[in-house]
Image: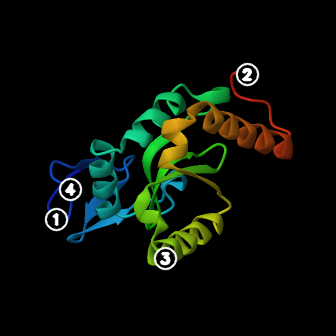
Amino acid sequence: MLFTRCNPLTPAGWRGDLDKKYFYNSKRFIMIEKKIFYKANPLIFARAKGLRKNMTAAEILLWGYLKTDPFGYKFRRQHPLGIYIADFFSYKLKLVIEVDGEVHNNENVKLNDEERQQGIESDGIEVIRFKNEEVMKTLEVVMEKINLAIENKLLNTNEIPPLGG
């Protein structure tokens, strides 16, 4: 059964099947619960799409590593998680990686980041943060910290990596 986009709040060009994220019913979009998106709404998906098109230099650099699926785990970039958008997210690891620019030094933004992180962690997701400068100047160190975080998660869950790596 196919439903077409009829709501002006919906991102342009969206169409959906029942197996997709949303379907049109009773003049509004109803979200089909998908665990991987933690009940994110269409506006969050549209915002995430825009952020994927406008990544910072540090995010692009780190994405170059994360898209290689370290330890066999897939990461998604600018991924919706409820009312938040994570810079990078691995569903199987329940791990979010955030890359913070200069604006995150502002006191109000720091408070918002703490609240956001608590909201994400309340869903059982670990959050690790890096500054733009760290990623740009010491990418190898950042990659090693990510690898250690993945290894710690694997040790704590006694799970074998999906690709045996």
Q: CA distance from mark 4 to mark 1?
A: 9 Å
- The answer to whether the residue labelled 2 contacts the one labelled 3, judged by CB atoms less than 8 Å apart, is no
Q: Is residue 46 above or below residue 29?
A: above
Q: Does 112 sit left or right of 96 as displayed? A: left
Q: CA distance from mark 1 to mark 2?
A: 45 Å
Q: Nearer the viewer, mark 4 or mark 1?
A: 4
Q: Residues within 10 Å of mark 2 (few under 14, many from 20)?
A: few
Residue at the spot of label 3: 107
Counting residues from the N terminus, which is met first, the one under dot 1 or under dot 3?
Answer: 1
Quadrant (top left, top right, bottom left, bottom right) of the C terminus: top right
| Image depth: mark 1 or mark 3 in front | 3
Q: Nearer the viewer, residue 100 or 115?
A: 100
Q: Which residue is mark 1?
A: 7
Compared across the picture, whether 135 is left or right of 85 comes to right
Amino acid type shown at disc 2: Gly
Q: Position of residue 19 (x, y in %)?
A: 39, 46
**Which residue is identified by label 4?**
11
Residue placed at 66% from the left, 39% from the top?
146
Q: Secondary structure at mark 3?
A: helix
Dot 1 amino acid type: Asn
Circle 4/circle 2 CB separation < 8 Å: no
Pointer 2 residue: 165
